[in-house]
Amino acid sequence: MLNFNKIDTMPDDDSPFSNAMARTKKDAMTLVHRALIGGRAALAFQPIVSARAPHTVIFHEGLIRIPDETGRIIPARDFMPHVEEIELGRQIDCAALEVGLKHLALTPDLRISINLSARSIGYGKWNDILGRALRRDPAIGERLILEITESSTILLPDLVMSFMKDLRKRGITFALDDFGAGTTSFRYLRDFQFDIVKVDEQFIRNVAHNTDNQVLVQALISIAEHFGMHTIAEAVENPIDSDWLTEHGIDCLQGYFYGMPTLSPPWMVSAQAV
């Protein structure tokens, strides 16, 4: 049984509002725990397309979705900020990996990315799930991308580098998520040698009209190119930003303009139609 007492659910004061907020947070965590135990976790898939050929999907990102007993999706904002440092966060990473690997096993031409906290590296259950899948089909690693956030990476740099080195031998690709949002030094960026960097959405939104963001995005693209990393722009929501990003050298695009996350991706719809 997970220990929710480690979650900061105690209010800063004794007001009715603070007590209500604390109860809401704890209730959300309990619902998440029950959903994981009940095997209800799912992935919503969002396409990542080529900037030069936007009708070409390069891969899909699998985003964790956790429904309660009625099927209502529990908002990620109600639990994600509170699980990073506790075991529930590790179990969410396990559920995402397990669901993602099932999709890869059922769809031979599919390539997907799954999010992973650096704190889950070395977590026994997560490693067992991946190990079993690779033993059943060693080639499945070549279609799996693991996304690790910049803020998570910098907490455990030596562990992350060793982990990446080992799993690259099994064909797995690594993406640095939210590039530019954290404090990764250039030395670490060089040493990690990520295959892909995803430029954080705060720099992408309205980039065609925001000169400050333009300078920052061009710098981030230049840094990534210098280290031989492919670039993805997150949160692309209109054709104007898409055109600007393509013109200035971004490799791939992800966002609502190209497709919203869906629990019914094309390969599932096709399989159900047969």
Image: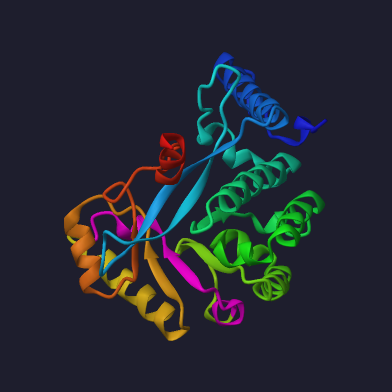
Q: Is residue 61 magenta?
A: no
Write down the region rendered in magenta: 188-207
Q: Nearer the viewer, residue 150 or 274?
A: 274
Residue name at image x 41 percent, y 48 percent = 46
x%, y% of residue 155?
66, 63
Q: Quadrant of the N terminus?
A: top right
Q: Nearer the viewer, residue 59 or 266?
A: 266
Describe residue 43's horizontal placement relative to residue 154 as left or right.
Answer: left
> How was this image coloured?
rainbow
Residue name at image x 49 percent, y 56 percent = 110
Residue name at image x 71 percent, y 46 percent = 90
x%, y% of residue 54?
26, 61
In the picture, residue 37 is in which quadrant? top right
Residue 11 seen by the camera: no
Residue name at image x 62 percent, y 71 percent = 171
Q: Nearer the viewer, residue 149 or 137?
A: 137
Q: Quadrant of the C terminus?
A: top left
Describe residue 177's horizontal placement relative to residue 2 as left or right.
Answer: left
